[in-house]
Image (cartoon, rainbow, N blue to C red):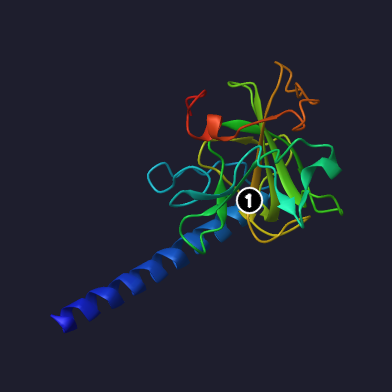
Amino acid sequence: MNTIRQFIMKFKKYLNHFLRMLVTSLSTIICEEQKSKESSKSFDYPHLIFKLFFGGYRITQLFGNKLRINGKEYYPQFGLKGHEGLDVVPKIKGYKAIYTPADGIVLMTRVSDGRAYGHMIRLWHPQYNLITEYCHLDKICVAAKEPVRKGTHIGTMGNTGSTFGTHLHMNVIKTNDKGEKLNKKNGYLGGIDPLLFLEGRDYQI
């Protein structure tokens, strides 16, 4: 029995390693192809991925959280009431590729220039009148004005900008019909709880 148990454990270990290498390879290929101007093809893997990461995400900091460091609230120094987005990491360690949870249009990408968000991507989802932002990235795999479909690999989780470690910071902001942000003075830069979007509480994606 012990031999069988050891065999099963080794098999699971090798299988997980193989899947991780496969997803990493696919992500690298997709990222390079999407960055190439020779092709505007969107990549969709509806049966392989879940929202944001392969295998789903784990929350590390909720929207609105009033983080305290050395007894002092952290966010008021930025003019914020609390955490303006949602911090997440992959449920499966090592799967850092980020997939858009809904169809949209890339409004802009920005390489880290000393700002807090580091490498970031901003998408607009006109069907919901929402903007989603993906911050602290390691790699950006899309370009401005590019249409993306649900399940498109748009970037890779990283640690750029002002962070306390590698993670994805995601913002969700309501817009008008022109894609312009609303309620920018709500204390969260216009942000709303991303879980209302990701978990389909107010939006069906």
Q: Residue furthest bottom?
A: 3
Q: Residue at x 46, y 59 (%)?
A: 92
Q: Is residue 166 left or right of residue 4?
A: right
Amino acid type, callout 1 = Leu
Horizontal placement of 68 versus 193: left or right? right
The quarter of the displayed image where residue 190 is located: top right
Asked where in the image residue 83 lies, by quadrant, the reply is: top right
The residue wearing badge 1 is 168
| Residue at image location 52% in from the left, 44% down from the top | 43
Residue 195 appears in the rendering: yes
Q: x, y percentage for residue 166?
A: 65, 60
Is 162 rendered above or below residue 86?
below
Depicted 66 relative to depicted 191: above or below: below
Q: Quadrant of the N terminus?
A: bottom left
Q: Nearer the viewer, residue 10 or 162?
A: 162
User: On the picture, is 93 further left or further right than 136?
Assistant: left
Image position, residue 82 (x, y; %): 72, 39
Residue 85: give x, y in percent of width and height: 67, 40
Which residue occupies the extreme left position in the image?
Answer: 1
Under tag 1, what secondary structure?
strand
Residue 135 image offset from top left, x and y in percent:
70, 47
Instruction: Name the residue located 86 percent from the left edge and 53 percent from the top edge.
Output: 113
Residue nearer the viewer, 124 or 148: 124
Judged from this view, the residue extending furthest toward the front is 71
Identified at 63% across, 38% down, the residue is: 63
